[in-house]
Amino acid sequence: MRIAIPQDTERFGAVLIHSVQQVWELDAGLKQKKNSNSDPDIIRRISYEELHDIEEQMAIVVPMRNERIKLVEGVLCGIPNNCLIIIVSNSPRHQVDRFALEREAFERFSRFTDKEIIVVHQQDPAIAEAFRSGGYEEIIDPQTKLVRSGKAEGMLIATMLARLAGRKYIGFVDADNYFPGAVLEYVREYAAGFVMSTSRYAMTRIAWHSKPKIVEDTLFFAKWGRTSRNTNQLLNNLLAEYTGFETEIIRTGNAGEHALTMDLAMQLRYSAGYSIEPYHYINLFEQFGGLQGTTLQKKLIQERVEIFQIASRNPHMHDTDKGEGHIEDMTYAAMQVIYHSPICPAKLKKQLLEKMRKMKLLQKNSEPEDVIYYPPLTQIDLATFLAPLAERRYAGLLIPAEKHQSLPEIVPVS
Ligand code: GDD
Ligand code: MG
């Protein structure tokens, strides 16, 4: 892969946000040409070996609920063989057990391709028991006593499983992507971000090249969705309030396609449902922004948290049949987490209220509802979490308790 070096980097305490990087070549050949004219200060060539080395240590998570199996198979087909795949499904099990059909199809796929795949149901009582015995009650729905529904909650399950499988990196791709080639590209770009990073606390976020739509019988390649435009602007406003400089650096506020080092993934706080991605930024600023009352430590100031934003080349085409209400929910969720953050300045809060009322996301005189937050996953004892899962089909892919000392160490930031 050949990729542009970031043109610009903004800093918020220990958090470095690199500007969007263009991909120049998806495949840059086996070796650098002898008399190469490519300027290494502008463009970086990342070798197969470097990408492969990261992919071998990466788990790719596919969260899904009620997606067509054929569509998901395409996604699995795009994930490089060396990545461990973790599918967390929240599809219904009654009247028809859709999950049983999914699992059967994915296990067959795993046999045919020699890919390691963990398939888990979000509402599996053993998963709920694993969190409960690990003292992580926040994720349990008080009514059902099972893990709450939602994409974020599925992602947290997968993060624990990836950690227990000994992976050092974790990436996410939605299950409803129509282009296997785009999925392959995202995973390569996640790996490229980690190759470029100089910190053990790093995140790669994909800025989609475009989202094709049919407009009056013609294919139009839209750059931004409505939700993304709104979230990015608000996050940039937040940044500007602190730095005093207007900025457009954040382009990936809603990036469903993103990856993290395990060191970072285990230590972030998360928010529920679709607000999880914008909250990554908010929580990074809260924890490592160096503002009063935050948990920034000297060590981390030296280490830094690095955020890479990589512009993919494939158009992003996913299932768009999920309705207008869904878009509104996502827009609302992003605004809600920004509003409730203790670092949200009064001026921005006022702007948010006005905007939400104008967009009819909020009634007059009411405030956005409270958000459900999840504490860092590091607080869960791994052996305790693992015990209830001993009988599960995928248990063989997890590191047994007696070997947990061999798992990569998570270096605490607070
Ligand atoms: N495990 C699990 N549990 N998966 C879920 C759940 C759930 O309760 N709900 C949805 N999913 C899966 C979907 O099947 C899909 O694979 C993925 O999560 C994203 O859900 P979509 O409903 O397709 O969301 P979207 O396409 O509108 O939004 C995506 O892109 C946004 C950026 O534009 C999501 O990734 C958002 O999080 C992201 O902000
Ligand atoms: Mg989708």
Image: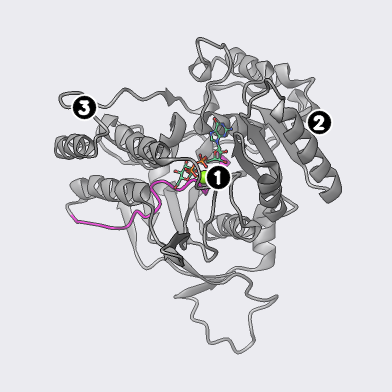
Q: In which quarter of the image is residue 117?
A: top right
Q: In which quarter of the image is the N terminus?
A: bottom right
Say whether residue 352 is magenta: no
Specify whether 138 is left or right of 94.
left
**First to last magenta residue range:** 245-262
Q: Which mark is residue 363?
A: 3
Return the residue at label 1. Answer: 261
Q: Which mark is residue 137?
A: none
Q: How far apart are marks 1 and 2 (CA)?
A: 23 Å
Q: Main secondary structure of the magenta part?
A: loop
Give percent across and percent down for residue 165: 71, 35
Could you tell which of marks 3 and 1 lies nearer the N-terminus?
A: 1
Return the residue at label 2. Answer: 396
Residue depicted at 43% across the width and 65% down the height: 220
Give percent across and percent down for residue 384: 66, 17
Could you tell which of marks 1 and 2 lies nearer the N-terminus?
A: 1
Q: How far apart are marks 3 and 1 (CA)?
A: 40 Å
